[in-house]
Every structure is written in structure tokens, then in C-alpha cells.
Amino acid sequence: MKPEWLKIKLPQDKSYELVKKRLHKENVNTVCIEARCPNRIECWSQKAMTFMILGNICTRKCKFCAVTTGNPTGKIDEQEPEKIAQIVQELNLNYVVITSVTRDDLSDGGASVFADVITTIRKICRDIKIEVLVPDFSGTESAIKKVVDAGCDVFNHNLETVERLTSVIRDKRASYHTSLQVLNTARSIKSSLVTKSGIMVGLGETKDEVKRTIKDLFENKVEVLTIGQYLQPAKELIPVYEYIKPEIFQYYKEFAYNLGFKKVSASPMVRSSYHCQ
């Protein structure tokens, strides 16, 4: 049973269905809707939205993620950048997050599509802030460079968990050290880039392991961190090992700030509802 601190009442908003219909009409995916994020109304009221590009079939199979696994056979929607840019303009958004499933079937892991979406949005909305939440691109520097050079403001790649549990919950093609390398490479390409990562807790990790993970991220040039409670999205996926108390999140938050992180969100209510490889 979930503890009281995890129980929230979803807000209601009349504009939600209108926006949902508009996105459905253009066949555009958002994490807000696909993952049924409980923070969606709050985000939309602040003119922020998270778009999920490159379809909804992932080439990897992680034990914490309910996204469909399969082989998209190289298929992409060539009109996707324009569709997203138009919606961004229509909704007058001022902050967007671009994320995706993992696409190992594409030669660059989908990096060129990320770049096209960024540049297309910029043509219409020059002042908008763009964050990307990318897969690992198998650690390929040229793919990472495509995304960074396109002009994102924040480069986000989730480490997901501590090193010991990486092989337990992530796809076998994922690597703790590859993920750290991706973040380090992005910052090395552009020193002014804001780099960000997120981890889940409640999977059986120890305090010392979480602290070591936070240190590893800081040592690899990450400056923004999110730490959230893992919640089991489907019966067949890995169960919650433990519900972490709010005071432990505060402990991790203070530890990260003391290391030198610029911004830390650590709370049972943090919803990194869509995690990428």
C-alpha cells in the first residue's frame, strides 16, 4: 500500500481535453498524456510540455518501463518536427522537453531527428527554452554532438539507478558508465550547456550507493539532478522494494547541494515518469 505522502488528487482543467484532441489529431505523442503524468495540468499552466518523438516502440526492454518493446524497422515520421513546432506555437509554450524511446534500429539512434525538432521549433519560437531527455545513443559522440550543436538549452540523460542495480533493472545494452560518458561528452562539446540527470530510488539501493551515484554524476559534469520514487507501472515489471520517506529525500538533496549541484529536485512526488536509456 502506498504511504500517505504519495497520495495526491489530480487537478481538473477544462482545456486538458481540447489540448489532448489537438495532439491526437496530429498524431503527436507527449509524456504528459502517454504516461498519465499527475503534474500535467500544473506544467501546462506554466506553458511547459514534454513531447515524445520517434514513435512509441522502444528497441530495449527495461524492467521498470511499460513502453512497448519491438523493432520499428527504421520508420520515422518525417513531418514530426513541423507538427511539434506548430503545436508549440499554437499553445504559446515557453518551455518544452523533447524525449524519445530508444531507437537502436537507426544508425544515429535518432539524434538527427532530435536535432531537426530543435531547429524547427527555433525557427518559429526563437526565445523558447528547449530541454532534451535523450537515450544513450550507444555512447556515440557524433550522435551526441548532433543534438548539442542543434542548440538545446538543457541536455538531460537519466542514469536511472545505482551501478549495482543497473544490470537488474535496465536493458542489457544499457550501461552505468556509458550513461555517465554521454553526460560528460555533452558538456565537453559545449561547456556552457546545462547538463541534467535523474535517478529513481525505492529499488533496493543503499544510502551509500545513492551518495556514490550522486558523486559520479557530479564528477561527470552534471549540474542539475532529479531524484524520485520508483512506482511500478505494470504488474509484470519490477515491484517497488521500498517507499522512501520524505526526510531521506531531503538528506539526498542536501548532500547533492553540498557537493556543488546547481539545482536539485528530490522528493517522493518528483515524477520522472518517462525514463530513457
Image (cartoon, rainbow, N blue to C red):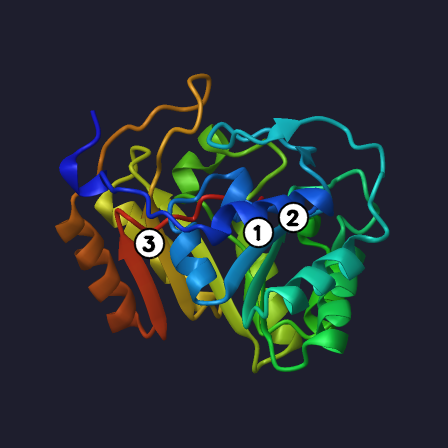
Name the residue carrying label 3. 212
Q: Are marks 1 and 3 in contact (CB under 8 Å)?
A: no
Look at discs 1 and 3 and give the one toward the viewer. Answer: 1
Residue nearer the viewer, 85 or 178? 85
Name the residue carrying label 2. 23
Residue 246 left/right relative to 224? left
Name the residue carrying label 1. 19
| Residue located at (41% from left, 43% from top) | 161
Q: Quadrant of residue 81?
A: bottom right
Q: Are marks 1 and 2 in contact (CB under 8 Å)?
A: yes
Q: Residue furthest front?
A: 14
Q: State how far apart marks 1 and 2 are (Cα).
A: 6 Å
Among numbered discs 1 and 3, the one appearing first in the sequence: 1
Residue nearer the viewer, 33 or 173? 33
Say if residue 11 shows up in the picture.
Answer: yes
Percent from the top left, x then y, of residue 179? 56, 52
